Amino acid sequence: MVGTKIDGVLVASSVKERVRKAASELKSQGIEPCLATILVGDNQASATYVKNKHKACAEVGILTKDHKLPATTSQEEMNELLGTLNSDNSIHGILVQLPLPKQLGEFETTSRISPIKDVDGLTPYNVGLLSLGKAILKACTPSGIIELFDYYNIDLEGKNIVIINRSNLLGKPLYHLLLQRNATVTTCHSKTKNLQKICQDSDIIITGVGNRTRFTLTPEMIRDGAIVIDVATTRHDEKLVGDCDFDKIIQKAAFASPVPGGVGPMTIAMLLKNTVTAASLSENIVRR
Ligand SMILES: NC(=O)c1ccc[n+]([C@@H]2O[C@H](COP(=O)([O-])OP(=O)(O)OC[C@H]3O[C@@H](n4cnc5c(N)ncnc54)[C@H](OP(=O)(O)O)[C@@H]3O)[C@@H](O)[C@H]2O)c1
């Protein structure tokens, strides 16, 4: 059996189409959705991510304001900029590109962002709302994965789902989103024992380790007809890869997402979606 490829580029373009319409409706009401990005230092990968986000915003009619700060930026300077952006009514979303240089704390920085401008869904307020099932601005990659399931009509209710990742960006928010869909969710990490057995017992495996030397999801680890979502992006043998070899896993899985072209495009699409939602929130169009 060869399964179905989960096409993140296709699903992301359908999300972008909805965002484009929403942005145009907001404009007709005099609101220009605008995302402010903050990039600290000269990490090439981070600069490329920010550039891609600007390009995607332009494609759907979202304005961007770019803030490039030197690698030596202090926490006080960062906090001052965030304070200015929080109180600027023309800015609807604020994105701080991670990782940050050592002198800047990720928590100290992201928790300064106004919750209604928190388009990455990382502030303690929005994380709390997510755990209560009340979040409006949700972490982009996890909510992008839910969009993939919905697009392919994959019902999550009662399914055994394993997430191999427990980060604040991915595994933890995803856990809540899956639980809200009535899945039975197991979260695994580097200290988990019997990971292979847990994977074999699961209907759906969502993997995000990002280090092939430490972990590779092989076809032997999954059951026939399982669904595999590969979130990881890492360089291996000079190629961009995930945690599994798509060509091999798809021979056994009912559905699988490739790397690249799976979850990655969804993360940017959900950032755009969050930005128009934040613009609506700022004008009380979406009520909490
Ligand atoms: N496509 C996208 O848009 C997107 C978005 C976000 C992340 N990513 C990718 O996803 C990957 C993870 O990102 P992240 O920020 O969440 O990284 P991270 O914080 O380093 O998380 C990696 C997770 O893998 C676990 N792990 C490490 N070795 C393991 C092993 N041998 N067995 C089982 N679990 C193991 C870690 O466990 P411990 O907690 O015990 O260390 C941790 O929970 C990266 O490749 C990243 O590039 C992609």
Image (cartoon, rainbow, N blue to C red):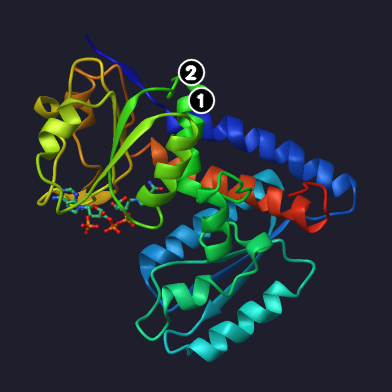
* Side (left or right) of 116 relative to 79: right
Q: Seen from this angle, which residue lies furthest right?
A: 29
Report if residue 68 is visible in the image.
yes
**Which image quadrant for residue 121?**
bottom right
User: Image point 51% across, 70% down: which residue?
Assistant: 110
Q: Mark 1–mark 2 contact, CB under 8 Å?
A: yes
User: Image point 75% across, 45% down: which residue?
Assistant: 23
Give the camera-side residue of 41 and 98.
Answer: 98
What residue is disc 2 on?
Answer: 153
Instruction: Give the x, y percent position of residue 210.
Output: 23, 51
Q: Is residue 11 placed above or below 224 in the rendered structure?
A: below
Instruction: Give the x, y percent position of residue 160.
Output: 30, 27
Give, as a three-letter code, the residue at label 1: Asp
* Side (left or right) of 192 relative to 256: left
Instruction: Give the x, y percent position of residue 254.
Output: 29, 16
Give, as a three-letter code, the residue at label 2: Asn
What residue is disc 1 on?
Answer: 150
* Side (left or right) of 99 relative to 279: left
